[in-house]
Structure formats: structure tokens, C-alpha cells
Amino acid sequence: MATNAREIIEGLQEAIHRIERRPPRRARFASSGRPEVDALLPGGGFPRGALTELAGGHASGKTALALSALAAAMGQDGLAAFVDGRGELYPPAAAAFGIDLDRLLVVRPLALGHGDGEGEVARRALWAAEALLSSGAFEAVAMDVPIGGVRDRMAGTACLAGMLRRLRAAAEKGGAVGVWLGVPGSVHVPSAVRLELSAGSVGLQVRRDFRAGSMMRTESAAT
């Protein structure tokens, strides 16, 4: 099983190296694909070279917003990736948001043996996300990873925090828009922007928390 895992990792590395690096990006921010959300964000979009956290429960609209952001960041000829650690992404749904599936890489780590639980699958997903973010080949990388199993496997949150910091560093290196799909209150993600989403009676409810110096301000919008 270890050999199979190495083959998967090496195959992903080769795929990344074969992808032609994109020209230097002109803008520091990429639209979320939703004007109402962009109005809440500094720079009018998700920052490149950083992580943006979309926190929400089931049916909160976070995956839809992530797909909108990927479509906007890709533009006419860019590439994007979706690390589907939960195995729940339905690719045809991505096409409905304007994503060209020929330019979307979906990475879905699988259990390779009886000893591979959720934690091992999530660990592979985090490794894949780091490799994709740092490659410089992708305009945006979305990550949906069940981190609870990783925390249990690593016997605490310290190692998980280190892995998440590596994702931030990888995004800075590669210049991609990093979109982390999280659950409110589950883990601290070192993101530049955090949006908390919920489905309301008037559509998507978005709350943005950000820090400026020692002060924290909250802004809300309905889309």
C-alpha cells in the first residue's frame, strides 16, 4: 500500500510539473464571482497569494461561492483545482458556475487500505493542497478537507496548525487564490479573510470578520 501511495504522490507531482506556468498575475485580488460579496472585501475580491476561509454548515452555500470564485479566478484560460477530501463534489455542478471542466483539476484522495481512516485521507488531501498551491500553475485552489480526523490522528491541534500554516506559505509562494471550506468553530485557519455563511430566507447570508490592528469589525450582507 505504501508503494501505491508513493505512486499517487509522484503522479500528482508529475502532473503539476507538466502544467505550463502562467504569466505573472496583474491583479492582487480576484472576484468572488458575487458582486454583493466583493463589496464586503478589501480590494473587491479574494486575495491572491493567501487563504480565504468560507465557514458554514451544510447547505450554507459555501461550496457554491467557492465554485463561483474559482470560475472568476480562472478567467478565459487559467487553471483551477478542487481538493475534494470529502468526496462530495459533483463536477457537472461546477460547470453550472461557468467552470470549464477541462481546466479544472479535481483531487480526491482515497483510502488505500484497511488502516487508512478519515485522518489519513485528510492528511493526503492537505499534502495535495500544499503541492497545488505552491506550484504556481493554478489561479485558484479550493480545499474541502475533513480535518477532525487529522486532529485525532496527530493527537492534538499543534501538528494540524502547522499543516495549515504550510498551506498559507504555499499560497504565498504560488500566488494562487486559496479557498478553504470550513465549519464555524472547528479550527483556526490562518486566513487573510474569513467569511461566515448561512442560508437565510432572503438568500445567502455573509458575515465578514477581519482584524485591523487590535480591533475587530464585523460586516454583513445578504445576497
Image (cartoon, rainbow, N blue to C red):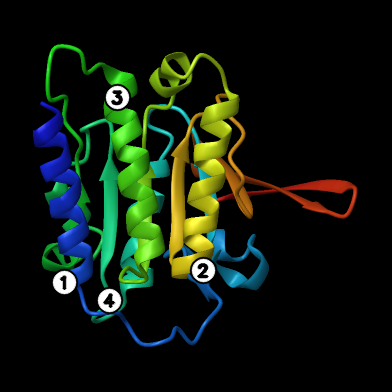
Dot 2 or dot 3: first in sequence order is: 2
- Where does the N terminus fall, quadrant-wise? top left
- Residue tagged 3: 120
Q: Hey, what amino acid is under mark 4?
A: Gly
Residue at 29% from the left image edge and 19% from the top image edge: 118
Secondary structure under the numbered disc 2 in the rendered image:
loop
Dot 4 or dot 3: first in sequence order is: 4
Other-residue count near label 1 (Cα within 10 Å), few / some / many at <14 / 14–19 / ≥20: few
Q: Is residue 211 left or right of residue 34?
A: right
- Residue tagged 2: 48
* Residue 164 appears in view: yes
Other-residue count near label 3 (Cα within 10 Å), few / some / many at <14 / 14–19 / ≥20: some
Dot 1 or dot 3: first in sequence order is: 1
In this rendering, the label closer to the viewer, 1 or 4: 1
Q: Nearer the viewer, residue 203 or 220?
A: 220
In this rendering, the label closer to the viewer, 2 or 1: 1
Q: Does the CB distance between marks 2 and 3 fall below 8 Å? A: no
Counting from the top left corner in percent of width and height, residue 163 is at 49, 39
Q: Does the CB distance between marks 1 and 4 fall below 8 Å? A: no
Q: Which of the 4 image quadrants contains residue 184?
A: top right
Residue at 29% from the left image edge and 24% from the top image edge: 120
